[in-house]
Image: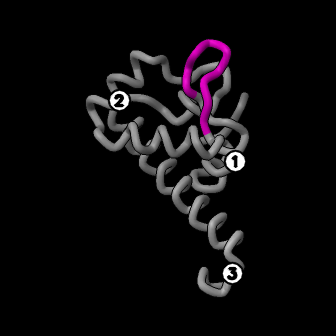
Amino acid sequence: MPAEALPSASTASFHIQRSLRHCLSSVAEMLYESGHVLETITLTQRGLSRQELDRLRQQHPRWAICQTTLEKSDAAMFNDYDRLVLTPLGRELMFDMFGQGAADCA
C-alpha cells in the first residue's frame, strides 16, 4: 500500500521505521569501517563505551545523528555497564535487515 494511502498514524510509523532502518544500515557500515562487528551493539552484555562512541563521532560525522535517532526511537539505550546497545526493537529490525547472525543474543 503506498504511503499516501495509509492513515496518518500508519504513515508516521512507516516513516519512523524507514528512518530507523536507514540509521541501522548506516551504523552497521560505520561500525565495520571502524573495525567493529554488529554483535558489538546487538549483544546486550557488550555495547559501545563512551570512549568508543566519541571515536566513532570523530571518524563519522553522521554517527551522532544516527545514535540520537536510535535512542529517541527506543531502538538503542545504555546498558547497566553504561555501554550503548540495541534494544529488542533495534535487534528485531537489525535481524530483519541483516539476518539472524546480526541479531543473535547468544
* Residue found at x 47% / y 38%: 67
Which residue bears the numbered disc 2? Answer: 56
**Residue extending furthest toward the top:** 81
Cα–Cα gap, marks 3 and 2: 37 Å
Taking 26 as reference, is 13 left or right? right
Q: Quadrant of the C terminus?
A: top right
Q: Name the residue under label 3.
A: 6
Q: Distance between the residues labelled 1 and 3?
A: 23 Å
Residue 79 in sight here: yes
The magenta stretch is 76-84
The answer to whether residue 105 is left or right of residue 36 is right
- Residue pictured at 45% horizontal, 44% vertical: 66
In x, y percent, where is residue 80? 67, 15
The disc, 1 or 2, on the residue closer to the chain's N-terminal end is 2
The answer to whether residue 83 is magenta is yes
CA distance for labels 1 and 2: 23 Å
Residue indicated by mark 1: 92
The image quarter containing residue 13 is bottom right
Q: Quadrant of the N terminus?
A: bottom right
Callout 1 crowding tier (Cα within 10 Å): few <14, some 14–19, many ≥20: some
Q: In this view, does 32 lie to the left or right of 40?
A: left
